[in-house]
Amino acid sequence: MIDSQLLSTEGEPLLLNDAQIRYYESFFTPKEAATIFDQLLEETLWQQDPITVFGKTYPQPRLTALYAINTKPYSYSGISMKPKIMTPLLQKIKHKIASISEAEFTSVLLNLYRDGKDSNGWHADNEKELGKNPIIASLSFGENRFFHLKHRRNKEDRLKVLLKSGSLLLMEGNTQEHWLHQIAKTARPIGPRINLTFRKIM
């Protein structure tokens, strides 16, 4: 396990094999992050889709929503989502990300982790709609949660990052080709977290 605190300062690349990842711990101030969290929680049209894993179907262990500047759907894990029109707040956040990234995002997938029981299993954001070497911008608001990464082949290459409220994690280059990531369950009593993952759907 690699201690991310020894690897990176604000916005500098994490020292990982086969990956390009940057972490901005204070992309939004605590006050800004709290305001954004409240607004997202209130105005987002959340849904809970069924997901099938190893032949068994059950409610996805979190709430989701998809917003975009176009009408292109997004599919993952057997779920196909049709986007709603991106709100002014989401467009404002997208514009702020553009100040440090040249990516032109079209869509944002929102995840609401209601408590420690909500999670997201090991996966890569490598759906064909995203094209080769997609750039994923992940923002966190609300409760802090650990973000786990592991290399697909080198078992010793693992990383755990505490994603703080107001932070931005950029995954670029061939990261999705070589690494998997997850938000694991936790038994700790914690409050809700909202995660925004901006992406470009081809």
Image: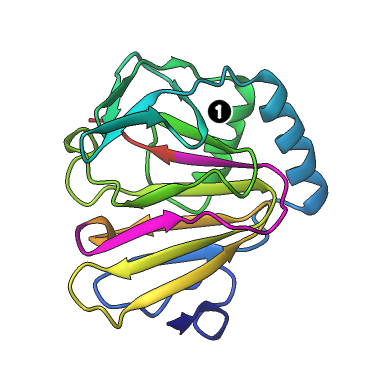
- Seen in the picture, residue 137 relative to 156 is either above or below; the reply is above
Question: Residue at image x 69%, y 28%?
Answer: 41
Q: Is residue 191 magenta?
A: yes
Question: Residue at image x 33%, y 57%?
Answer: 172
Residue at mark 1:
91
Give, as a three-letter code, the residue at label 1. Answer: Gln
Residue 125 x %, y %: 29, 46
- Seen in the picture, residue 8 relative to 109 is either above or below; the reply is below
What scheme was used to colour the molecule? Answer: rainbow
The image quarter containing residue 114 is top right
Question: Residue at image x 59%, y 65%?
Answer: 162
Q: Residues within 10 Å of mark 1 (few under 14, many from 20)?
A: some
Q: Which residue is more in the foreground, 148 or 33?
A: 148
Q: Is residue 104 magenta?
A: no
Quadrant into which the C terminus falls = top left
Q: Which residue is more in the foreground, 60 or 99?
A: 60
Question: Residue at image x 42%, y 82%?
Answer: 1
The answer to whether residue 13 shows anywhere in this view is: no
- Seen in the picture, residue 85 relative to 161 is either above or below; the reply is above
Magenta region: which residues? 177-197
Q: Residue at the bottom extreme?
A: 6
Residue 174 x %, y %: 23, 60
Residue 121 x %, y %: 38, 50
The answer to whether residue 193 shows anywhere in this view is: yes
The reply, left or right, for residue 140 in relation to residue 58 is right
Residue 87 x %, y %: 58, 19
The reply, left or right, for residue 135 in relation to residue 165 is left
- Seen in the picture, residue 82 relative to 103 is either above or below; the reply is above
The reply, left or right, for residue 200 in relation to residue 36 is left
The image quarter containing residue 198 is top left
